[in-house]
């Protein structure tokens, strides 16, 4: 018998592919002296260059995704597909195999799964239960993340009754996600806060470094000094509502009290040509399209702007909100952005508007931009709020969950 109190707790992490937001968190968890983490990926396409249709270009993340923690790419039925092609990601695919054998061989104490809407993940849960390995689940779902009829809501509650028998602890990414679990019958005692966070230090440092070149970038983009800048940073697709943003901006950009703001689009996608035409008609000379911006380029965009806008019609969270708050900027989001409930405090660090209501979005822009001193104060408040929504809170929440399902396994006490 192993003396399980004298070795690190062995934690397996299962997710479809390496994710740029998660890699630094996995490194941070792996640095804990009493947790040995191994990540398992069904595919590693994101760690190489690949063609992303929504971005309308080839993508290659310029941040390391596989460094600083143990990991393995699982074999999959049908193979990895052509190099450079984005593989299908749905309930069935990528369909990997061999995980149960690895779970047993690794003598893991707990399995943390990201996402429940995957066949392979359900198989992993079954294998974990058979082996006596505790299961932790993290997912993005909320009541606003999808449109559901009364029948679908009833079916979802029945689904969670089954899921609850497979999972020992649910890791809530925020208020709406936690409420979603509770509304579907998951007991409060099984819910642990592991907030959706980004590498705050990285984005804060990137914005601070970019500040020295702020005016040079402004001049490079042909932006007049003294005029406030609004930023949109996301794919140019319908779900993000970029056309509605231009419509609302067209209503306010000439108002003297707002000091004739600019609107920048950082991102690419199939709507770009139509959006450029719309901007030329509704806000001539006031809108710039920057194209796709890599992870290392985004902080300079965050530093350049005065306020950030995310008008999505459907957004489970919106980690870009976290990123721009690390640069100390005000944020304007729709009420269908999951992050709003936790990170956006209307009147303090930004505004929340009614989804698909261009007039209300215009109202939110006026509210944020009219007073320059208040706008700067909102940015400072964003920095305060995001400083308490970080990887440190993630690690603390994960440790509480592990201590609850694997009592006595962690070598240092959980506060």
Image (cartoon, helix red, strand yellow):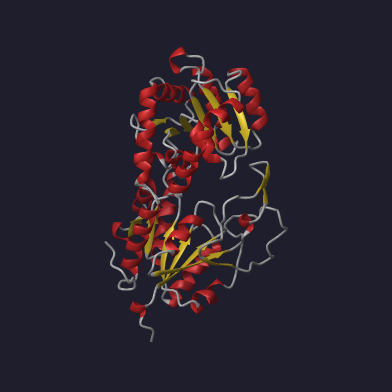
Quarter occupied by residue 30:
bottom left
Can residue 258 be seen from the camera position used here?
Answer: yes
Q: Position of residue 316 (x, y in %)?
A: 47, 45
Identify which residue, 137 or 213, lies in the foreground: 213
Q: Residue at x 64, y 42 (%)?
A: 54
In what quadrant of the picture does the C terminus appear? bottom left
In what quadrant of the picture does the N terminus appear? bottom left
Residue at the limit of the structure toward the front, as seen here: 212
Q: Position of residue 66 (x, y in %)?
A: 56, 60
Residue at the limit of the structure toward the right, as seen here: 82
Can residue 342 be seen from the camera position used here?
Answer: no
Where is 75 relative to 364, above or below?
Answer: below
Where is 21 relative to 359, above or below?
Answer: below
Q: Position of residue 315 (x, y in %)?
A: 48, 41
Quarter occupied by residue 350:
top left
In this image, 346 relative to 355: left or right? left
Residue at the limit of the structure toward the top, as seen here: 256
Q: Residue at x 62, y 18 (%)?
A: 281
Identify which residue, 158 or 218, lies in the foreground: 218
Q: How many marks?
A: 0
Identify which residue, 142 or 38, lies in the foreground: 38
Q: Residue at x 55, y 61 (%)?
A: 67
């Amino acid at each position: 018998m192993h003396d399980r109190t004298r070795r690190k707790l062995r934690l397996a992490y299962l997710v479809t592919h390496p994710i740029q937001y998660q890699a630094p968190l996995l490194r941070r968890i792996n640095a804990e002296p009493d947790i040995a983490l191994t990540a398992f990926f069904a595919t590693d396409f994101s760690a190489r260059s690949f063609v992303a249709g929504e971005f309308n270009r080839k993508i290659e993340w310029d941040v390391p995704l596989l460094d600083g923690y143990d990991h393995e790419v699982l074999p999959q039925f049908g193979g990895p597909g052509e190099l450079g092609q984005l593989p299908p990601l749905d309930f069935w695919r990528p369909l990997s195999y061999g995980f149960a054998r690895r779970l047993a061989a690794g003598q893991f104490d707990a399995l943390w799964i990201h996402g429940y809407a995957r066949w392979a993940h359900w198989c992993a849960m079954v294998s974990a239960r058979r082996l006596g390995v505790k299961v932790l689940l993290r997912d993005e779902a909320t009541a606003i993340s999808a449109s559901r009829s009364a029948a679908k809501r009833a079916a979802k509650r029945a689904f969670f009754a089954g899921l609850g028998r497979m999972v020992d602890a649910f890791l809530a990414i925020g208020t709406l996600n936690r409420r979603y679990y509770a509304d579907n019958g998951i007991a409060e005692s099984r819910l642990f806060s592991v907030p959706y966070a980004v590498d705050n230090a990285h984005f804060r440092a990137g914005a601070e470094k970019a500040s020295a070149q702020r005016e040079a970038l402004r001049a490079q983009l042909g932006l007049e000094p003294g005029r406030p800048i609004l930023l949109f940073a996301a794919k140019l697709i319908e779900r993000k509502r970029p056309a509605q943003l231009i419509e609302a901006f067209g209503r306010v950009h000439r108002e003297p009290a707002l000091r004739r703001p600019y609107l920048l689009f950082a991102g690419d996608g199939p709507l770009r040509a139509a959006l450029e035409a719309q901007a030329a008609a509704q806000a001539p000379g006031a809108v710039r399209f920057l194209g796709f911006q890599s992870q290392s380029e985004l902080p300079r965009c965050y530093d350049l702007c005065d306020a950030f806008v995310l008008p999505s019609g459907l957004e489970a969270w919106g980690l870009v909100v976290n990123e721009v708050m690390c640069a100390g900027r005000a944020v304007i989001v729709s009420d269908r952005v999951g992050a709003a409930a936790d990170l956006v405090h209307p009147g303090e660090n930004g505004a929340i508007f009614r989804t698909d209501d261009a007039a209300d979005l215009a109202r939110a822009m006026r509210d944020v931009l009219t007073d320059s001193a208040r706008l700067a104060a909102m940015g400072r408040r964003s920095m305060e709020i995001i400083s308490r929504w970080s990887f440190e809170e993630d690690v603390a929440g994960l440790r509480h969950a592990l201590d609850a399902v694997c009592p006595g396994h962690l070598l240092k006490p959980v506060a």
